[in-house]
Amino acid sequence: MEWNGFKYAICNEFLQGLNWQEQCELAAQAGYKGIEIAPFTLVREGINDLSPIRRKEMAATMKNAGLECAGLHWLLTPPPSGLHATTPDEEIRRKTWEYIGKLIDFCGDLGGPVMVFGSPQGRSTAGGLPLAEATKYLIDGLRRVADHAANRQVKILIEPLGHNQTDVVNTMGEAVKLLHEIHHPAIQTMFDFHNTVDETELFHVLIAKHFRHIHHVHVQEMDGKYLGSGNGVKDYVQAFQKLKNMNYDQWVSLEVFDFSPGPQIIAQESMQALRRIEETLALKDGI
């Protein structure tokens, strides 16, 4: 089967100084085919700010620019404030998972396939809660929304995050263990280069081991700067080769944490770096 290359998307939080149309146009002009949305960048009070009419307008703007919605991330970043998925406070948990249900509808309305559940401050242990109990609350909440996500053709992806960000789900192995316990096709995981600080295996080994559960990829330099500003082009080749070998056909999405170079430089130079990685990949399987 002929390989047609990776599908590249761009996360919109470093574009938030632009309006939605400008964000889509910049992404498309830089060569991306998708845009991944951080909901907090688009609302004042919460996702209900975006009416059904506005959502249709957003979808049309993406389509007119030649883009698709690659999904959502930063799900619990305010606004609204006060959300927490694993708190011992039952009422806050209820509001949080209800809000995630609303995000599922937003994602489905825009045609997004995944919601990346990172949000470290919204899932860490709180109030002296033991880790095992916090993890149980996370599992219970995901079970609560799984059927709704499936009905909207959305997958919720638990993102492993380093211990420097959260104490709940730090490695891909921990994420997959959680998935096995939930055992629902709408609850899966993803791979993020930047968030592998607690892993003991190489990128390509992790990808091969957990591939059937990986439904999204985030890429940036290991220090969180835009791809191409460091050693990522060299260091990530084996990982991208493994993704290619295994016929990965879902989104590779650029997420950065240093916005200072400006949106055009970040978007354009990261795309150039992605193309350089592609140029180094072998035509046939093998690393």
Image (cartoon, grey):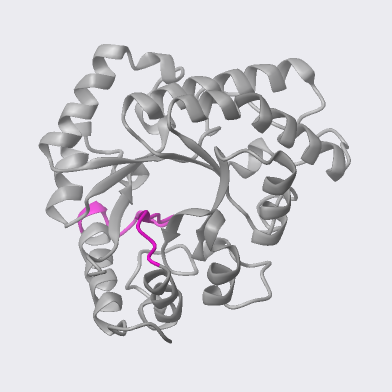
Quarter of the figure with the N terminus: bottom left
Residue 252: x and y in percent read 36, 58
Could you tell whether 103 is left or right of 36 in the image? right
**Within the image, what quadrant is residue 241 found in?**
bottom left
Residue located 37% across and 71% down the image: 244
Q: Which of 52/140 is in front?
A: 140
Q: Which residues are magenta?
A: 247-264
Question: Does residue 88 appear in this view?
Answer: yes
Could you tell whether 56 is left or right of 79 in the image? left
Q: Which of 120/28 is in front?
A: 28
Could you tell whether 13 is left or right of 176 in the image? left
**Within the image, what quadrant is residue 280 found in?**
bottom left
Residue 131: x and y in percent read 84, 44
Residue 204: x and y in percent read 52, 75
Question: Does residue 82 appear in this view?
Answer: no
Q: Is residue 261 magenta?
A: yes
Residue located 68% across and 67% down the image: 198
